[in-house]
Image (tube, rainbow, N blue to C red):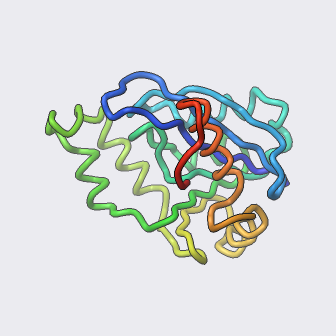
Amino acid sequence: MNVIGFDDGPFAREHRGNLLLVGAVCSRTRLDGVLTGRVRRDGSDSTDAMVAMVEGSQFAEAVRAVMLQGIAVGGFNVVDVHALSERLGVPVLVVMRHEPDMAAMRRALFSDAPTVRPPVRGAARKWRLIERAGPIEPLGKVHVQRVGLTLEAARALVTSTTLHGNIPEPLRVAHLIAGALTTGRSRGRV
């Protein structure tokens, strides 16, 4: 079963514009391919970018699930997990190392303090996508949000794609590759 995990490359706090997005395609824990694309920092193109990356690749028919490390890439470029699942015809599993602080996320999204960051365009729409993604559920040593699969199917997917630690290989590998392509070296935890 091929699963694609997406992660963005690291970026400076003051960076505005496009950022690297990497998709790592794995069959269980074996890396089978890598896709790259771009998303706008704090934009609204993440769902379209992911769909285009998968549909434009040799893996379009082989991908059976999508994994995300959190619901947003490139700052607050929030993925519409329901649209992603529907457009690709596969389940989407959002995997998080820790349960996020939703109140802090909401404050950051709606912050208009210019010393913190410029206001996030489309904040209300993005917050609706975050809320619509569904409940955050504990699953072993991670937390998940899921679209198109049961909690037991999510557990089986995480177990079958995890080799080292708690994070599934598609996400771990996408993180390492995105870091290396952006900064010249991979680093840090997923």
Q: Nearer the viewer, residue 81 or 69?
A: 69
Residue 109, horizontal then vertical, whole percent: 28, 45
Picture residue at 69% right of the left edge, 72% below the top: 155
Name the image quarter holding residue 123.
top left
The answer to whether 3 is drawn above or below residue 156 in the figure is above
Count the marks: how many? 0
Residue 19, horizontal then vertical, whole percent: 49, 28
Picture residue at 49% right of the left edge, 56% below the top: 133
In the picture, the quarter occupied by the N terminus is bottom right
The answer to whether 162 is drawn above or below residue 69 in the figure is below
Picture residue at 60% right of the left edge, 77% below the top: 140
The answer to whether 95 is drawn above or below residue 5 in the figure is below
Q: Nearer the viewer, residue 156 or 86?
A: 156
Residue 126, horizontal then vertical, whole percent: 38, 43
**Left/right of residue 40 with respect to residue 146 in the rendered view:** left
Name the image quarter holding residue 177.
top right
Name the image quarter holding residue 139.
bottom right
**Left/right of residue 103 with respect to residue 43 in the rendered view:** left
Q: Nearer the viewer, residue 54 or 172?
A: 172
In the picture, the quarter occupied by the C terminus is bottom right
**Left/right of residue 166 with respect to residue 110 in the rendered view:** right
